[in-house]
Structure formats: structure tokens, C-alpha cells
Image (cartoon, rainbow, N blue to C red):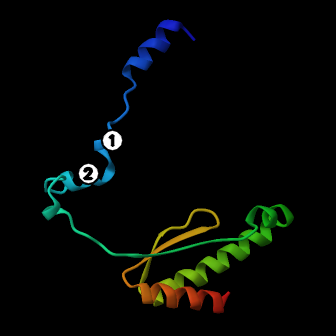
């Protein structure tokens, strides 16, 4: 690569300053002063996180069976999360991240998942 091209690209590359975080952007984008505490809405949430123990080993032993079992388990967990008034935030690979407005609902969901699986 031409040395002139490298230096010109580096001049164009700029990092966002820390004050440009997503939270501040979101507050300012949706109205309100990000530095004004009165405009900030506090939200208390219980988080439920799960992943498969030994996932890499299981995939190495029998990938097809592991993928099928994971799919079945996720479907069961999604149903239980919904029954306990939770919301699935993300579920990449063997991970699952959920949100509950109530800690009681999150704990009850966790117990139900353990009993089911």
C-alpha cells in the first residue's frame, strides 16, 4: 500500500470523545438535556442471563445434536420468560439475556427454567 494513502486515511480516522456515548446521544436525540438529571428516567430492571456449560465441547462431540438441543431449550426458555412477564433482549449462540421489571418474576422464571430443563 502507498505510504501517502496510509497517512491520509489516518488523518480521516477520528475517535468519538467519551461524552458521545450512546446514553447521552439517546437522551439528546429524544429531547432533553443529557446533563440535566430531571430529564433522566431511572429504570430498575432484573437481568436474567444464561449460557450452555461446556458448549464448545458439546459442539465438538456432536454438532447437529447440540444445535437441535439448544434450539429446543431456547424455545422452552422463551416460553417461560414470556409466562413470567420477561423480555428477551438478545440470544446469540448459546447465550440468552433477558429483562424483567420484577426481581420476583426473574427468580421465579429461573426456578421454572431449572425445573423444565
Q: Which image quarter: residue 1?
A: top right
What residue do we see at 44% from left, 88% from top? 105
Left or right of 16? Residue 80 is: right
Foreground mark, 1 or 2, reads 1
What residue do we see at 65% from left, 79% from top? 73
Circles 1 and 2 in contact, beta carbons < 8 Å: no
Q: Position of residue 71 (x, y in %)?
A: 65, 74
**Total labels drawn:** 2
Q: Secondary structure at mark 2?
A: helix
Q: Position of residue 29 (x, y in %)?
A: 20, 52
Q: Secondary structure at mark 1?
A: helix
Q: Position of residue 47 (x, y in %)?
A: 46, 74
Left or right of 111? Residue 57 is: right
Between 117 and 107, the one nearer to me in the picture: 107
User: The C terminus appears in which quarter of the rendering?
Assistant: bottom right
Q: CA distance from mark 1 to mark 2?
A: 10 Å
Left or right of 4? Residue 112 is: right
Label 1 packing within 10 angstroms: few (<14), some (14-19), many (20+): few
Q: Is residue 43 above or below residue 79?
A: above
What residue do we see at 37% from left, 21% from top? 12
Q: Is residue 8 above or below residue 39?
A: above
Q: Earlier in the sequence, mark 1 or mark 2?
A: 1
**What number is the disc on residue 100?**
none
What residue do we see at 51% from left, 91% from top? 108
Q: Position of residue 6 (x, y in %)?
A: 49, 14
* Residue named by callout 2: 24
* Residue named by callout 1: 18
Amino acid at each position: 500500500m502507498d505510504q501517502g494513502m496510509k497517512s491520509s486515511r489516518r488523518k480521516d480516522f477520528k475517535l468519538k470523545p467519551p461524552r458521545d456515548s450512546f446514553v447521552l446521544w439517546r437522551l439528546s436525540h429524544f429531547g432533553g438535556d443529557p446533563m440535566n438529571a430531571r430529564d433522566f428516567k431511572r429504570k430498575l430492571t432484573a437481568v436474567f442471563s444464561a449460557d450452555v456449560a461446556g458448549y464448545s465441547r458439546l459442539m465438538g462431540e456432536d454438532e447437529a445434536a447440540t444445535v437441535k438441543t439448544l434450539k429446543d431449550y431456547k424455545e422452552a426458555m422463551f416460553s417461560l420468560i414470556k409466562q413470567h412477564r420477561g423480555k428477551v433482549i438478545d440470544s446469540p449462540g448459546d447465550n440468552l439475556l433477558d429483562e424483567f421489571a420484577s426481581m420476583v418474576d426473574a427468580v421465579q422464571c429461573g426456578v421454572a427454567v431449572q425445573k423444565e430443563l
